[in-house]
Amino acid sequence: MGMQAKSFWSSFFQKAGRRRHLIMADSPKISSLYAAHVSRPVEGDAEEVVTSVGIDIGTTTTQCVISRLTVKNTAPGTLVPRMEITDKEVVYRSDIHFTPITGENLVDTEKVFRLIEGEFSKAGISPSEIDTGAVIITGETAKKENARRISGEMAGYAGDFVVATAGGKLESVIAGRGSGASDYSRRYFKTVANIDIGGGTANIGIFKSGKAIDSCCINIGGRLLRVDAEESRIVQITGPMAHILDDLGLSLKEGDRVDPLNIEIICRRMAEVVLNSLQSSALTGLEDALMMTAPLRLDYEVECVMISGGVADYAYTTSPCDTLDEIGRYGDIGPMLGRQVQQVFKGNGMAFIRPTETIRATVIGAGSQTVDVSGSTIVVTDECLPMKNIPVVIPFGEGIPESPDAVGEAIRQSVSSLYEAADLEPLAIGIQGDEYLSYKRIQSLAQGVLMGLEPLIRVGFPVIVVLEHDSGKVLGQSLRVLNPAAQVICVDQIEVNEGDYIDIGRSIAGGTVVPVVIKTLVFETRQV
Amino acid sequence: MNEQELIQSIIGKLVEQGVIGTLVEQGVITGAPSAETVAAVSASPSASQGDAGEPVTLPPLNEVKVDKPKNMAALEAMRKTTPARIFMGRCGARQKTHSFLHFQADHAAAVDAVFMDVSDACLAENGLFGVQTLVKDKDEFLMKPELGKKLNEAAKKTIAEKCVKGAQVQIIVVDGLSSTAIEANIADTVPALIQGLKAEGISVGTPFFIKYGRVGVMDEVGALLDCDVVVELVGERPGLITAESMSAYMVYKAGKKTVEADRTIISNIHKGGTPPAEAGAHMATVVKQMLSHKASGVTLSEAMRG
C-alpha cells in the first residue's frame, strides 16, 4: 500500500513537471508572464556587496577583520523590494597583536596605525575600498585618556562610514553578536548570556530572540595581573586587581614571588564575581566595586551561558593549566581565569555553550554585525550623508498625537531637553511602534515635525526621522512637499530608543536603502 | 433530526463538556448558544436566513492554542513570524472550535469581498466618478472574464467628457475580485500616489472608478485617454488571511498591443502587508522610472538591469 502510494505521487509529480515544462515552451505569452512573475522588482536589482572592516583595540590584543556583507532584495517579484543583509563572510582575519602601549601607559597611536596599515596591505585592501565597519576600543584601553581620539582618527583613516566607538554596553552587544550568542538565542529560543572576557573587562550581553535585551561590563580580565613565569614574580598589579587582592586579604606587591595556588585563588574569586553579577542585581562589596556599568536588571531568566574573548579558549579546554609556565604563558593570568570560569559556572549548573568565535568575537562583531540596512522605501538627501553620532529623541512615548500642533509641541520639548536654544545640533526624531498610519495621520505628523524642528531647519540642519513602521517614503515625501527647502532624511523599519545615537551612511543599492548603525550610549562606562 | 436540531444538540453537548464554555463566559457567544448565533458566524450573506442574531466577536487568531506545549515562548515567537494558521491546536483529528469559527468567519469575509459592490459613499469620499464594463451583474462578471476587460458605451462617453486626454499618468480604481480591498485602501493609496507624482512634476489625469472590471480594462483606458502610464488599483482575489489586499498594475503606453509581460505589479497592499500609503509613495517612484525608461513590465526590469 505504502509503495503504491509513493509511486502514484512520484509519477504524478513527474507528469505535472513535464506538463508545466511543455506549456512554458509552447506558449510565449505564458512563459513571458512567468518571466514577469519571477523577474526581480524594478528597483535595486542587483545584489550589492559592502566591504566592512572591524578593528578592535583591546586591553591585551589588537586585531582587525575584513568582511563582505551582501545586500540583496529578499522580497518575491511582485512585492515592494525588501533589501536585507543576506550574507556575511569574513574574508580576512589579521594576526592577533599585542596592543602597543607607551611608557606613560597610553595607547601608542603611531604603532597602532602602523599595525593596521600593515594588516590592510596584507589583506590587499586600501581604506578607500572600505564602505563601513567599526573601530572599537575595548576593555581597560577604553579608559585611557587618548582612547576617544584614537578611535576617531582610526575610523577616519579606515573609511568614510566607519564608526568609532568604545564603552562597555555597546561592546557587550557587539561581542555577543560576533560570538554567535545572538544567533543561538534566536535559533533555539533561549535567553543566552554572552560573557566576553578579555584582558581588562568582562562584557556581559543578554540575548533573547536574537536581540540584546540587557548588558553590563565588569572590570574582570586576564591581564589585570601580569606575571613573569620564569622568575615566578608579579610584574604588574592593576587598580582593579588591588581591589580583588584586598577582598581576598592577600598582600601581594609588584615584584613579589607568586605561586600557582595564589593565582588559582585569585582567579576563582574573579570567576565568582562574574557569576554573581549574573545572579543578583543588588551587588555589594567587590562585585559592586568592579561593576563599570549599571548591573544587569535580571527581570528575565538566563538559560545558558557562552564565553568569548581571549580567556574563552581556556574555558572550553581540558588542556593542562597547573604550572606557572602554563598559566603565565602570555605574561598574565588569562589561562587560569578561563579554567576557573569553567569550573565555577559548571559547578553552578549553568548550561555552558561553545561560541562560534572566541578571541575574535568582538572584532568580528564590530566588522560585520554593527551595520544594518534601513527599510527599502525611504527618502534621503544623499548630500547630507554620511552623518554620525546623531542623538535620537523619542518625542511620542504614548503614541503619536492627533493634531499637528501637539506633534510640534512634543518635538519642541524634546529638542529643548537636549539643546540650549542658542546651541543647536542635529538630532533624529525616533518614532517607535508599528501602529498603522493612514495618509491623513502622516500628513498631520509631517506638519507637526516641521513645526517642531523649525529652529533646526532655520539654521540649515536636515530633518531626520527614524520610524519603526514602514511609512518612511510617504512621510519623507510629505515633508518634502510641505517644505521643499528642507533637507529630508526619513528612514524606516528601524527600532531606536531614547538616548541612542545613530549613524546613517550614503544610500546603496540604487538609492533604495541606507546603512545604519545604532549605538546605545557611547562612552558611558563608569570609571573605577 | 433536522439540521437545526442537530446543531443545537451538538452545541449543548460542547457546553456540557466545557469545550466552548469559556467562549460563553467571555461573552463571546452571548446568551444561550443557538443555531442562530452559529449561523451569524459562519454564514455568507447569501446563506443567512431570518434573524442573524447578535454580532459575534471572536478572540484573536494569533494566540497559540497548542495544548501542553514544551516551550510556549518558542511557539509564540514562531507564531509572530507568519499570519498563516499555525499552532491552532487540535481536538483529536479535528480543529478546535475557535479556529473553526475563525475559518468560517474569514471565509465569509472573503465571499463578501467578491460579492459586495464598492459603495457610492466610498466613491464620493474619494472624489471618484464611476463607470461600468460590458458586464451586467456579478454572475456575469464571474462567468465571463473577457467582458470585464471592456468598457461599455456609456463609460467611454463619460470618460471622454470628464477626463483630460494626454496626461502623463491616469489612475483608475477597479473593483476586481475584492470590493473590500478598494474600500479599505484607496483613501490612503491614491492621495499618497498623487502627492508623490506631483512632487516629481508628473501630470495626473482625473482618477475614476470602474465597476465589474478586470486587470485588462486598463488597456482600453490607456488607448482612450492617450496617457503615458495607466496605474490601476484593483482588488485582489481574497484569501483567508485577508480580504483587503489590493494590487497596483502599471503599464507604459497601455493599449491594444499590451501583453501581460508589459505589466509592472505591486501586490499585497493592505494594512498587514505593504501599508497602503507607503505603497502609493513607492508607486510614484516606479512610475517615474517607467517614464524615464519609456517601458514597463519585463522590459523595464531588463532596462534597469542595464
Image: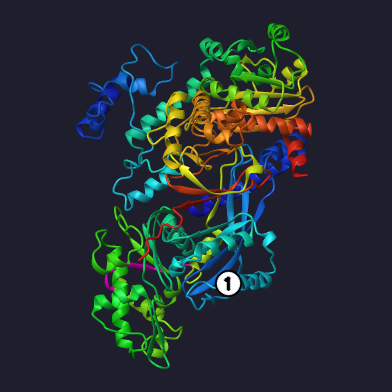
Classify 10 Å Cα crowding around label 1: few (below 14), some (14-19), many (20 and above): many
Residue B166 visible from this viewpoint: yes
Report which residue position mark 1 lands on: A112
**Residue B217 placement (x, y as % from top left):** 69, 20
**Residue A510 placement (x, y as % from top left):** 69, 44
User: Which of the image's four quarters has the C terminus of chain A?
Assistant: bottom left
**Residue B207 placement (x, y as % from top left):** 65, 16
Please name the amino acid that badge 1 sits on. Answer: Val
Can residue A349 be found in the magenta stretch? Answer: yes
Q: Which chain carries label 1?
A: A
| In the displayed structure image, the side of residue A128 where residue A458 appears, left or right | left
Figure check: A472 above or below A175: above
Can residue A301 be found in the magenta stretch? Answer: no
Nearer to me, A425 or A68: A425
| In the displayed structure image, the side of residue B36 where residue B21 appears, left or right | left
* Circle 1 SS class: helix
Applied colour scheme: rainbow
| Range drawn in magenta | A346-356
Residue A127, picture quadrant: bottom right
Figure check: B232 above or below A145: above
Nearer to me, B232 or A253: A253
